[in-house]
Amino acid sequence: MTTSTPPLREAARAIVLDADDRILLLRYDENGGFWATPGGSLEDGEDHATATLRELSEELGIDEKTVDLGAQLAERSKDHLVGGREVRQVEKYFLTRVSAADVDPARVSQPDNIREHRWWTLAELRATAETVYPLGLADLLTGVLAHGAPMHPVVLAG
């Protein structure tokens, strides 16, 4: 019996904070419903930072020129279904800060089944019974808010 590794899907995601240290998460209905950070797969020839900026524009209507993309905070690898096909998704997470006013739903070009966006406090993130991806996001955010970006990206669980 042979097992094959699913095809690689590289992705870039943003940990978006506002001036009050709230994190912006997006809600999806599939797979029982969950919240996740903005982001998606890289396009041909794109690096992770460029993809992160593009995704912020496509999913949140944020003008890429106004975003100061920060350090890579984390990475994660997870096998899961995308469009009905199993892939091994490898994600890199970048820090950025924007204001709530920068999010412009009228400019969204790729809604990607996003049902809503919401700003969460760290306390709300820790207390929720809802599914939030990536796992360990609250702990990562706690460290970033207390000590700044890690020296090396943190490896997150699925």
Image (cartoon, grey):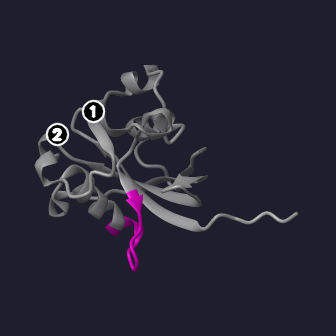
Residue 105 vs residue 40: left or right? Answer: left
Look at mark 2 in the image and give the residue it sits on. 100
Task: Tell me the quarter of the image containing the C terminus.
Answer: top right
Task: Tell me the quarter of the image containing the N terminus.
Answer: bottom right
Measured along the vertical axis of the image, is residue 36 above or below residue 107? above
Camera-nearest residue between 20 and 104: 104
Q: Give the range drawn in magenta.
A: 40-50
Measured along the vertical axis of the image, is residue 96 above or below residue 10? above
Give the residue at x 35% y 66%. 51
> Tag 2: residue type?
Ala
Look at mark 1 in the image and give the residue it sits on. 119
Magenta stretch containing residue 149, yes or no?
A: no
Measured along the vertical axis of the image, is residue 87 above or below residue 16? below
Name the element at disc 1.
Answer: strand
Q: Position of residue 91 (x, y in %)?
A: 50, 57
> Tag 1: residue type?
Trp
Q: In the rendered structure, which disc, 2 or 1, sits on the residue that comes first in sequence?
A: 2
Disc 2 residue crowd, few under 14, some 14–19, many 20+, Cα 10 Å: some
Q: Do the residues labelled 2 and 1 touch (CB within 8 Å)?
A: yes
Give the residue at x 40% y 72%. 47
> Label 2 to label 1, Cα distance in Å?
8 Å
Residue 22 vs residue 143: left or right? Answer: left
Give the residue at x 44% y 19%. 127
